[in-house]
Amino acid sequence: MKIGVFDSGAGGLSVVKSLLADNLFDEIIYYGDTARVPYGPKDQNTIIRYSLEALEFFNNFEIDLLITACNTVSAYALPEMNAQSSYPVVGVIEPGVLALENSDLAKNDNILIMATRATITSRRYELALEKLGHTNITSLQTGLFVPLVEEGIFEGKLLDATMEHYFSAIEQPKAIILGCTHFPLIGEKLKSYFKDEPILIHSGEAIVEYLERRYDLEVKEEEASLKIFASDNVAGLRKIADDWL
């Protein structure tokens, strides 16, 4: 089984890492739209257009399934992508919400959603959580983390200052939804900032669990092969893949 993974940049490699660890597929084709990252500040029509252009790229590989690792794409472009695709296109928002619901959180525990502007504006996470009865939700636009991760800055003064900028005035969360695939790459730093207390909901882990259940997948005997493509600076993306994977 051949699967595609699409992200606006390098962040979707956090999903690839989980896919490789569980070894459910024979081949993984990764495409990062590094020429136009980040998607988070862009308008809905632009996000949809970029996503459909990425779909055209994957049509060259005869994949069986496509994961839109980008939360922004998952929030805005899934219906259009599925309408123009001959294979299923799966987003990461629904799996993330289901993963949180499978935890032991109480309905009034504080949940922090950190994501890009577009994902927060869509209220996809917030509405899904409210529908499940959660009453204490904080939604926070944290888009500055995206270029830091793209630059390979996973620790240090810049990252610390950005965390202080975003989090200094918020209530200590019981769970954090990492609503952008770039954010798991700074997951350990996030946990440390919040004194290792919150549960982190990670798109990669959530999507693997979701796919296992939905498609009845089995572990492969041989490791999956991985091919990495990008719209710009492929060498840079592959360097991040080497470091992270």
Image (tube, rainbow, N blue to C red):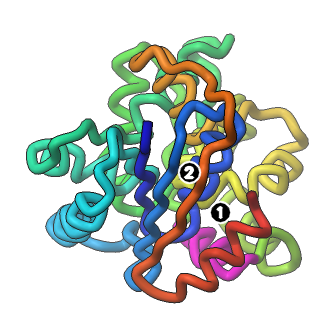
Crowding at dot 1, Cα within 10 Å, few <14 / some 14-19 / many 20+, comes out as: some
Q: Is residue 238 above or below residue 202?
A: below
Number of numbered discs overlaid on the protein picture: 2
Secondary structure at badge 1 equals helix
Camera-nearest label, 2 or 1: 2
Quadrant placement of the C terminus? bottom right
Of the pair 117 and 86, the residue shown nearer to us: 86
- Residue at left offset 83%, top offset 51%: 188
Q: Which residues are magenta?
A: 143-152
Say which residue appears at 40% left-offset and 81% top-offset: 231
* Magenta stretch: dominant secondary structure: helix
Look at the image and say whether residue 40 sits in the magenta stretch: no
In the rendered image, the vertical position of residue 123 relative to residue 43, given as above or below: above
Horizontal and vertical percent position of residue 8: 43, 68
Q: Quadrant of residue 175?
A: top right
Q: Quadrant of residue 144?
A: bottom right
Which residue lies under the disc numbered 1? Answer: 166
* Disc 2 residue type (three-letter): Met
Q: Which mark is residue 98?
A: none
Answer yes or no: do the residues labelled 2 and 1 have beta carbons within 8 Å? yes
Name the secondary structure under disc 2. strand
Q: Position of residue 155 (x, y in %)?
A: 85, 70
Looking at the figure, which quarter contains the N terminus? top left
Q: Which mark is residue 114?
A: 2
| Of the pair 130 and 202, the residue shown nearer to us | 202
**Image side of residue 149 versus residue 140, left or right:** right
Mark 2 crowdedness (10 Å alpha carbons): few <14, some 14-19, many ≥20: many
In the picture shown, does residue 183 fall above or below 40?
A: above
Residue under the image location 23 percent in, 45 percent down:
78
